[in-house]
Image (spheres, rainbow, N blue to C red):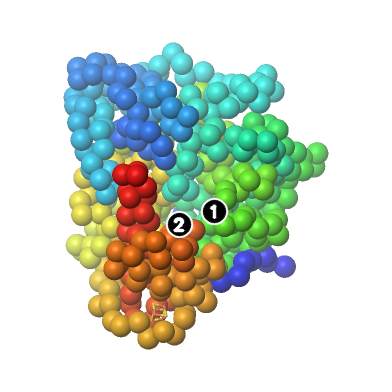
Amino acid sequence: MAKSFVGGVHPPCRKDRTHALPIERLPVPKTVVIPLSQHTGKVNAPLVAVGDRVLLGQKIGDIDAPIACPVHASVSGRVTAVEMRYHTNGREVLSIVIENDFTDELHPTVQPKNLNDMSAADVLRWLREAGIVGMGGGGFPTHAKLAPPPGGTLDTVLLNGAECEPYLTADHRVMVEWADDVILGLRCLMKAAGVKQGYIGVEVNKTDALTALRQAIAPALDIQIVPLAVKYPQGAEQQLIAACLNRTVPKGKRPVHIGVVVNNVHTAQAIAHSLRTGFPSIERVITVDGACVERPGNFLVRVGTSFADILAVCGLASEPCKLLSGGPMMGMAMHTSAVPVSKCTSGILALSRAESPAGEPMTCVRCAACIDVCPMFIYPTLIAQYGERGRLEEAEKYGALVCHECGACTYACPSHIPLMQWIRRAKSDIYARRERG
Ligand code: SF4
Ligand code: SF4
């Protein structure tokens, strides 16, 4: 029986154009732009300068901070600029531009590892050095996520294979085609966390992924596959934990506070790939779709490849009404295609007008639909309205900081009020006010 959570919405899945297409490697571009921040936490400092030759897999940015993760060259070549460039987060970020020499000359640090030879501490150190971050969109450095809270312990690693965002099917293909790697990556995470139990939650519309994962699990491993109902946001951490483990993360706490670490299935696969080959995190699978895309699919691309280069290969049948990084529920609208794929980019959507209806916001009719669907059991309408009026104490009191920005409330609102966007702004104002003291 498929498990689920309370609340949520059922947007059209729109995965039919890509879910059955095998992963295809795209040509490596002439130029890559590597943002020095591809994670939650401190921005890295550059370790190279203009004119330097860099090798494939070489560490080119790092910083000594508890929440940070280095970045690596995804091609070999010459550094032509270290400058501010647009990032998929909507801001400009210091980035390293590399002109590809197409030799793919390897850096000597690219060496395979054997999980059996590594202690838990070794695995944690190596995860950091390999630049592994959450590839589901969050970008939290994986080694930092595995640290239990002071005085606490971890007991479970849970992989997110829900991929509940409409259109996106990259994780689906990763599970189908690289199931062995997903399981090896999960074993690696379990070793680093010192836990014996592993779970993978997968929505039931991915039957081939459920089968592939079950076949990849050796009988001696304590790993369970949990079929999940198709519902949004099934892949959000709290909702995944509720569905798979029947446990609740208290408001204002993180999963580690109840002994659970959640990672994405693509992150687990990237860990296994890095173990087997020695390559740090320099490539990922993305879904390219939307009615304006001539050749949709799931593509393995080097980090730093621009959206423009990818769309040139996939072809645009018409000018998109909206260009998104990520899915339509939580993704970010891009004003340019001159942005690079980062470790956290799950997809590129070039949507037509019909796919992105934008009704003008109207007055709240107090229908409570937003409250009914909110999986965090807060009051989206109150928080959004208080936030818009600058009444941040009230916005916080009603749960602004508990909101994980899933967008279910915006989707459900019959008055087209951009609730999630207003709440996101209120959260940012609350944090900014705290920083100012
Ligand atoms: S208030 Fe936040 S958590 Fe609740 S539905 Fe809206 S975006 Fe999701
Ligand atoms: S769903 Fe929209 S109209 Fe209904 S209560 Fe919430 S904000 Fe108001």
Identify the residue at horizontal 27%, vertical 49% (top origin): 90
- Quadrant showing the C terminus: top left
Residue 242 rendering spot, x and y as whole percentages: 65, 60
The reply to whether the C-beta atoms of the residues labelled 1 and 2 are less than 8 Å apart is: yes
**For the point 72% across and 42% down, which residue is it?**
155
> x, y (%) of residue 299?
40, 46
Q: Position of residue 429 (x, y in %)?
A: 32, 54
Q: Secondary structure at mark 1?
A: loop
- Kind of residue indicated by mark 2: Leu
Q: CA distance from mark 1 to mark 2?
A: 8 Å
Say left or right for 269 vs 87.
Answer: right
Count residues near mark 2 (Cα–Cα under 10 Å), then give few for <14, some for 14-19, many for 20+: many
Q: Secondary structure at mark 2?
A: helix
**Relative to 288, is 166 above or below?**
below
What amino acid type should be assigned to the residue bearing mark 1?
Gly
Residue 108 occupies which quadrant of the picture?
top left
Task: Tell me, for residue 401, which label it has, or none.
Answer: 2
Of the four image quadrants, the one with ligand 2 is bottom left
Q: Depth check: give the residue in front, 1 or 374.
A: 374
| Residue positioned most to the right | 220
Kindly identify which residue carries mark 1: 252
Where is residue 216? Give x, y as percent: 69, 43
Of residues 54 and 244, the one nearer the viewer is: 244
Q: Tell me if mark 1 has few (under 14), some (14-19) or many (20+) residues whose alpha carbon lies within 10 angstroms of its own.
A: few
